[in-house]
Image: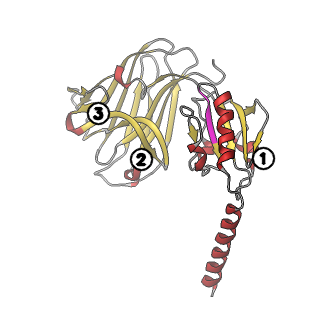
Amino acid sequence: MAQLVLLVGAAAWGALFQVRLSGVHVPDTDYEAAAQVLAREARPGDVVLLYPWWTERARLFVPAGLPAVGHLHSDEEPLEDHPRVWLLSVPGLPRADLPDFERTHMKDRARVGDERRLGKLSLSPWNNGLYRPARFSAASELGRAQAWVESPDGTRAPCGWNGRAFSCPGELFATVGWHEVDQVPRRCLFVRPGAGGAKLVLEWPEVSSSPGDALVLEGGVAWESAVRAGPEHGDVTARAEAPGTPPVVLVAKEGVEAFGRSEGPAPSSAGPLRLSLSAPGGRDRDSCLGLFVRAPRGAP
């Protein structure tokens, strides 16, 4: 009897949700009006943040070249690459509390213009207090790197470069693309780490930084392979090193689907930057990583 009550209650809640959802249908004219504002006023480096995150139809109208972010947990994203955030919301959707969202998830940002009500949409620009410009991005500068597979005895086997990706001995590789970590799509450095004590190594001959900058390493094992456990898989250890500073190490644990982040001080002068990756098992450990030199918050 209790199960029947729960089933009926769930069905009633679902029906009510659908009724409310159908009552806040957003016409295309509202999205078009928002797109016109963005086309006139958006600046290079801006980003559109969707609230609720499943306001997917808005993507069809956002002007080309202006990124739109809306996915599970996107309200927690710092959006560090973007000095300004456009908050595009459908306040009437079920469980959408725009004032509460602004208080809790925009607290490190400052509104810099009036809220526009465009039919059933809300659109407002915010300065992003979490902005940390990247002075270096490994994914953007992969073509400047050299790569090799390093055996435990230090022997190096070079990787070939075809203009888009490194192809390495042992079917290892390094390229750039969109991949998913912990249900979030990211454009990242996509790599297959070395196994059995071998390391895949990428090295950039000269990377610039300034006093106060940070060396940031983030990411995890991609797709469903992240949750696989056992000695044939193993942890992935990523290690970023530059002369004169402690290494920054990120470990993606076997059997855990997670996006990790580690950072430390960047060297205060230009020099080489090396990234090495290994996994004891090496099987199904393809990883999606970001490696950056980032300026501190508030830097131009």
The image quarter in which residue 129 lies: top right
Instruction: Give the alpha-carbon distance from disc 2 to disc 1, as whole Å.
Output: 38 Å
The type of residue carrying mark 2 is Lys
Q: Residues within 10 Å of mark 1 (few under 14, many from 20)?
A: few
Vertical comparison of 79 with 60: above or below = above
In front of the other: label 1 or label 3?
Answer: 1
Q: Earlier in the sequence, mark 3 or mark 2?
A: 3
Vertical comparison of 184 with 19: above or below = above
Q: Residues within 10 Å of mark 3 (few under 14, many from 20)?
A: many
Q: Which residue has dot 3 on it?
A: 199
Query: Is residue 296 toward the left or the right of residue 114 in the image?
Result: left
Q: Position of residue 79 (x, y in %)?
A: 59, 34
Instruction: Give the alpha-carbon distance from disc 3 to disc 2, as whole Å.
Output: 17 Å
**Which range is magenta?**
45-49
The type of residue carrying mark 1 is Pro
Q: Which residue has dot 2 on it?
A: 253
Instruction: Give the alpha-carbon distance from disc 1 to disc 3, as whole Å.
Output: 49 Å
Which residue sits at x=71%, y=53%?
96
Q: Which residue has dot 1 on it?
A: 99
Residue lying at the far top in this picture: please name it.
269
